[in-house]
Amino acid sequence: MTNQWESWLFLAAILVVATLGKNRSLIIAVLVVGLLKAIPGTDQLLDTIGSSGIDWGVTVISITILVPIATGKIGFADLMNAFRSPAGYIAVICGILVAILSAKGVGLLAASPEMTVALVFGTILGVVFLKGIAAGPVIAAGITYTILTVIHQLPAGLGG
């Protein structure tokens, strides 16, 4: 467990990097988390966000993806057309792989919390310097899980 000053310093460093990288999403995230941290009595709320935030984010992304279906911009014909090219099949396979990797990633993060720090750091670097988006920690954890399985270096408590 870190002390309070260290966590503020860490958040400030992330804010500086996000600002230098002109990453609005990360800037907003740091400011929201910092604001919640500054308000007395929000520890339980921060814990809830920390434990459920990924699920909420996946829900928001899912809603965003479903909007074109709801508005009629995408229909069954578009789905069928996706299977008329190799790219469509590759997209389906990648979707399946990401779902599997994400499931493994959640397990790795739960069993090995220290991985979270490295994954978050890598995600921040990718977001700020490579113009990525912060949707990757769970997928990155799944990829890490897969690599660790291949090289037989899984943390204790995680079976293959």
Image (cartoon, rainbow, N blue to C red):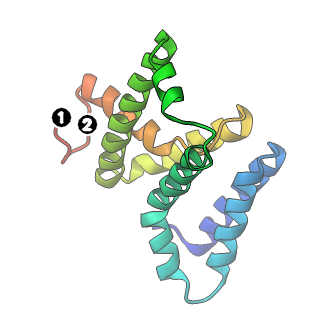
Quarter residue 93 falls in: top left
Q: Which residue is mark 2?
A: 154
* Residue 151 in view here: no
Asked if residue 32 lies left or right of residue 67, the reply is: right
Asked if residue 89 lies left or right of residue 28, the reply is: left
Q: Earlier in the sequence, mark 2 or mark 1?
A: 2
Whole-angstrom CA distance, mark 2 to mark 1, is: 8 Å
Nearer to us in this view, 58 or 141? 58
Q: Residue at x 53, y 36 (%)?
A: 75
Q: Residue at x 32, y 43 (%)?
A: 103
Find out whether the residues at labels 2 and 1 contact each other: C-beta distance under 8 Å.
Answer: yes
Question: Where in the figure is residue 32, as x and y percent of width and height?
Answer: 68, 69
Check disc 1: other Cα within 10 Å, few if <14, some if 14-19, many if 20+.
few
Asked if residue 119 lies left or right of residue 71, the reply is: left
Q: Any mark on residue 34, and which?
A: none
Question: Where in the figure is residue 107, as x and y percent of width and height?
Answer: 29, 48
Q: Any mark on residue 160, and which?
A: 1
Check disc 2: other Cα within 10 Å, few if <14, some if 14-19, many if 20+.
some
User: On screen, 74 above or below 19?
Assistant: above
User: On screen, 33 above or below 68?
Assistant: below
Quarter residue 36 falls in: bottom right
* Residue 117 in view here: yes
Q: Amino acid at mark 1?
A: Gly
Asked if residue 112 lies left or right of residue 39, the reply is: left
Q: Amino acid at mark 2?
A: Leu
Name the element at disc 1.
loop
